[in-house]
Amino acid sequence: MAVDYRNQTTLITGASSGLGAEFARRLAARGSHLVLVARRGDRLESLATSLSTAHGVSVTPIAMDLAVPGAGAKLAAAVAEHGIEISSLINNAGFGTHRLFHEADPQRITDEITLNVTSLTEISRAFIEPLRSRGTGVLVNVASIAAYQPGPTLAVYAATKAFVLSFTEALWYESRGTGLRVMALSPGATQTEFFDVAGQGADGGTRRMSAEHVVGLAMTALDRRNPPASLVTGRANRLMIGASRLAGRRITTAAIGAMMSAGSRR
């Protein structure tokens, strides 16, 4: 049964570009009001205006850096100040660092863990009770195919996404019977600004999917009568994950390491 997003309000983090902006476009087109969160207020304002004009929905932009301690509580307070009740949540904000761990900046590592793990967890906790009570919406946490195996040169990123995958699948089980649809979304390399931040070569030389394709697959999965606890986008990505499970973690880690090193040289 397809989700009816009309008369709902969806909170989307990392909404100024990439997957977050595409989720905003798709949800606005299906009648959802939106709360858009990202650091870049000018982009949020522009997106909010265009979506509100095109689809007649209410769009509230909140410019906020979520890679800081206590960001979850700060965001919940900001939403409350606007008097908005959230019924769906897309935790998309996150970034990666593509380099050897011992060469990475310590503060950047801390910010990466804070944004990808701590803030995502805090935001989920801040809103999951009203989401469960209403039971008509979705909770999507964006993980990655990197969640399924160690990631040499993306060591912290892969580890944070492994947390997101495990955490979200647990919430899927805990939310059964509430009507809330919970799903971890695990894209492979996607054509977004992720690589501008993480660094070129972070895709390991693999082909990138479009944000439109990834979000389209996610929306279709959420519309199923029994949505999956997790979704890996792309047949090639699913085959790769299946092969890694058969090969074992040591062989898989070596293969990923070799792939990432080759991708960095391209």
Image (spheres, helix red, strand yellow):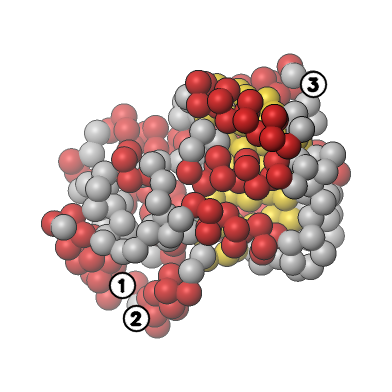
Going by the numbered disc 3, the residue's amino acid type is Gly
As drawn, the label of residue 252 is 1
Q: Which circle, 3 or 1, is nearer the viewer?
A: 3
Mark number for residue 26? none
Q: How busy is the neighbourhood of tag 2: few (under 14 within 10 Å), some, or many (20 plus)? A: few
x, y percent for residue 150: 34, 61
In the image, is residue 114 above or below residue 247? Answer: above
Q: Residue 173's x, y, as percent? A: 71, 61
Q: Position of residue 98 (x, y in %)?
A: 27, 47
Which amino acid, mark 1? Thr
Q: For the view shown, which residue lies furthest in the left direction?
A: 265
Dividing the picture into quarters, in which one does residue 102 lie? top left
The residue beneath circle 3 is 83
Task: Using the numbered discs, state the Cα–Cα distance from disc 3 to disc 1 in whole angstroms.
Answer: 49 Å
**Tag 2 residue:** 247
Outermost residue toward the bottom in this view: 246
**Left or right: 85 as drawn, with respect to 43:** right
176 vs 41, nearest the viewer: 41
Q: Is residue 96 left or right of residue 100?
A: right
Find residue 99 and report its horizontal and vertical position in percent. 22, 47
Q: Quadrant of residue 184?
A: bottom right
The reply to whether residue 117 is in sight is: no
